[in-house]
Image (cartoon, rainbow, N blue to C red):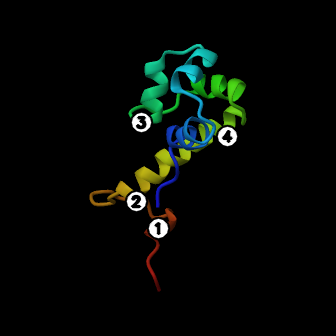
Amino acid sequence: MLTMHPGEFLKLSFVERKRISPAEIARRANVSVEEIEDLLEERADLSPELAVRLSYVIGASPEAWTHMQAYHNLRKALVAFDPEGLEPFDFAPHARKAA
């Protein structure tokens, strides 16, 4: 199961639940409407700069916003990961042979 993209969280929690328009979020955060819409539609990842701005205008810490994005990206990478062709070192935990 993938974690929530920050754009999905913003859309569900603020655009839909609190009825705040993307244009109003963009105005208050002093960014373009396109930047907010791209985030809401998950066409773009959350930048650290936007995380700071959303923290100020919406709430939650910038770290919480960036953690949400990083964890979402990590979960996507784990789902897509294929170890074919990789050569782990002998000291890597997953390279240990079962006795």
Indicate which label's residue lies in the foreground, 1 or 2. 1
Q: Disc 3 or 1, which lies upstream in sequence?
A: 3
* In this rendering, position of residue 11 left or right of residue 37: right
Q: Disc 4 or 2, which lies upstream in sequence?
A: 4
Q: Which labelled disc corresponds to residue 94?
A: 1
- 76 above or below 58? below
Other-residue count near label 3 (Cα within 10 Å), few / some / many at <14 / 14–19 / ≥20: few
At 44% from the left and 77% from the top, the residue drawn is 97
Q: Disc 3 or 2, which lies upstream in sequence?
A: 3
Q: Nearer the viewer, residue 78 or 57?
A: 57
Q: Nearer the viewer, residue 2 or 13?
A: 13
Residue bearing the label numbered 3: 41
Looking at this view, name the residue that lies furthest to the left. Answer: 85
Indicate which label's residue lies in the foreground, 3 or 4. 3
Residue bearing the label numbered 2: 88
Instruction: Please state which amino acid type lies under the numbered disc 2.
Output: Pro
Where is residue 59? Give x, y as percent: 72, 32
Residues at circles 1 and 4 in contact by the CB criterion of under 8 Å: no
Q: Which labelled disc corresponds to residue 64?
A: 4
CA gap, disc 4 and disc 2: 33 Å
